[in-house]
Amino acid sequence: MHIIVVISYLAAAVAYLAGSTLLAVSWRGQRTGGRLILATAVSALWAAFLVYTEWQRSVAVNWLLMAEVLRYGAWLVFLSALIGTGQMAGLLGRFRIGAHALWIALALYCMLPATDLFQTVVLPLSVNVPLVGVLILALLGVVFLEQIYRNTAPERRWALKFLVIALGVLFAYDIFLYSYAVLYRQFNPSAWAARGFIDALLVPLLLVAAVRNPKWSLEVGVSRRVVFYSTSLMVVAFYILATAVGGYYVRLYGGDWGRVAEITLVCFSLLSAVSIVFSGRARSHLRVFLSKNFFSFRHDYREEWLRLTVTLSTGDADLRLRALRAMAQTMDSPAGVLFMRGDTDDFVPEASLNMPTPAGLKLPACAPALEFMRGRRWIYDLDQPPPLGDEELRAPAELISLPRAWLAAPLVLEDRLIGFVVLAQARARRAFDWEDIDLLRAAGSQVASTLAQAADAQRLAEARQFEGFNQLTAFLMHDLKNVAAQQSLLLQNAERHKHNPAFMDDMLATVGNSVQRISMLLDQLCGDATPAASGRVQLGVVIDKALAECSAQSPRPEYRPSAEDLWVRADADQLATVLGHVIRNAQDAAQVRGHVTLRVERAAGDAAIEIEDDGPGMDEDFIRNQLFKPFFTTKASKGMGIGAYQARKYVHSLGGAMSVRSIPSQGTVFAIRLPLAKPAGDATSDSKLRAAS
């Protein structure tokens, strides 16, 4: 029993220390709250002193009794603060003064053995005096609690309920304990040992009472999750303890069957406990019980919001199923169905959770109930009459007929009904009230926003796919237009030069090049073309190829090459196409009698290419806002507006830059700078380019 007593009061000391610490951290300076902190702190010291007393077994009994008196004094000081703030202050004023005088006198009486005054007293210190005194203090405590509760307005008793329960148990237990001690001149060993455990169980009730009484200036935050799990563990602990006691008595009085019956009972009890712990219905009932009796609001909105966010943002399931699960969790519902707009503007089931739906189920968006749900954000309790008593607003029969259907909650975003969910009856049946409505509406708005963003993201991804396809098509059509222009020039000159062997050679080379480019374009369109490799190429060879492709158009460019061979890292064909596009644009601007000049030189670590024409030029606004804008052209039906955009994009991909200088009525200069590569040329690329040109 010695170890049990130590553990019992040690548990009480830890519990009261934790409680007083939490209260002290939350204290905002009000006197009543400060006295509650004092009472819990003194109780922690009292329990710690009893642990020390039991462990040493050498402390005088008068010190133990003085600890008991001081503990009662602290609690009576707190109760006096409650009496002083109520209407019963005048009625209990004398009792309050008498109670304080009594515990102070008892404390002084217990200190007599430590003073010189005791040496002059003829009679020894009587232990019965403080025992009877503490018994009277316990009775006064019960009277104070009864009067406080009775004289509190009925609507305020809810706030004091757990304080009255906790201190009532404390005083009642001590009345039993001290009555036994007065009658038999000793404490009941079992009752004395269990006292610490019982006092420790009262601390959570005191904390809940502090939460329910903000006027005490104690802003204590008691987590619902902590209360739920601690209560669950407490219930399981008492269940196991009862099972052990039952098994002991079965073995004691069961005869030959006692041991067998004990093992069977213990196994059955453990099996039942595990089944209850893992039962969703049992947890739901416990959660409802705690919400009704321990908290001012049924829902912990912070926990609900965090859980909703986690459910929507994590998991391998489809977003629609996660959204349905998030809505179901808010109402502790085990099943539900999510309805969203289909292709025909009807609402169809998009996700189902443990609730089968008929095949082909559709609900028209123009149904009166759905319009009412959207406009009022109305949440249908499917077991209740229609809203406003209007039969036209009754929920659709298809929803009411769903298995265990309970609620229909809208998912509204900016006055748009994104969808709605039908939830099954909660695991623990309870009333559906305004707290549930507020929570479902807030959760529905968040879920609607998430679903709408997901739908917009999907549409944006599809639009980008189409944009990429359109961009590829535009590039291909631009290249095909250039090939067609080459073929057109050949046809225009064929009648005059068809008997010229040199012309025929050029024509065959041009046709062969056109066939090769068309084949490459077809491969790109089919997705069979491999990405072009960027190797070191001689810039002069690439420019010669580009000039050859533009030679059929007038005016012919004047080429001023660099004094040294310049090498760049690029794909030869693509770079030649880009340069050819810029040269042709200069030819179009200069027209037949104009001039086009192409200059190449080394500029630090870059190769500088300038293509100049004496055409009409461009203003700064056109260059800045329209020149490189895709699908914009000044050539009417002859152009597609993609060449300049494609050229600059490719030059940038090589790490280069393209700029434009132009003066209206004087001309334009396109300047291209490409990073130089090492002078070691690629012989294969060089020979390939020379053969192509």
Image: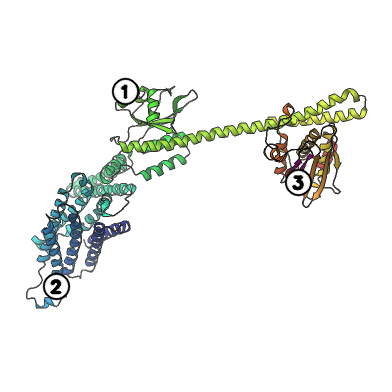
Question: Residue 86: x percent and y percent?
Answer: 18, 52
Q: Amino acid at mark 2?
A: Leu
Please tell me which of labels 2 and 3 falls first in the chain.
2
Q: Amino acid at mark 3?
A: Arg
Task: Give how far apart the Cα atoms at labels 3 and 1 are.
Answer: 76 Å
Q: Secondary structure at mark 2?
A: helix
Task: Give how far apart the Cα atoms at labels 2 and 3 are.
Answer: 104 Å
Q: Secondary structure at mark 1?
A: loop
Would you place residue 9 above or below residue 400 in this image? below
Q: Quadrant of residue 287?
A: top left
How many C-alpha atoms fall within 10 Å of the one at disc 3: few (<14), some, or many (≥20)? many
Label disc, if present, on residue 112 of the rendered structure: 2
Q: Are marks 1 and 2 in contact (CB under 8 Å)?
A: no
Question: Residue 661: x percent and y percent?
Answer: 75, 43
Closest to the observer: 172 or 576? 576
Please tell me which of labels 1 and 2 falls first in the chain.
2
Please tell me which of labels 3 and 1 falls first in the chain.
1
- Please provide the residue range marked out in magenta: 660-673
Instruction: Tell me if residue 11 can be seen.
Output: no
Q: Amino acid at mark 1?
A: Asp
Q: Quadrant of the N terminus?
A: bottom left
Label disc, if present, on residue 673 of the rendered structure: 3
Q: Which residue is mark 1?
A: 390
Question: Residue 89: x percent and y percent?
Answer: 15, 55
How many C-alpha atoms fall within 10 Å of the one at disc 2: few (<14), some, or many (≥20)? some
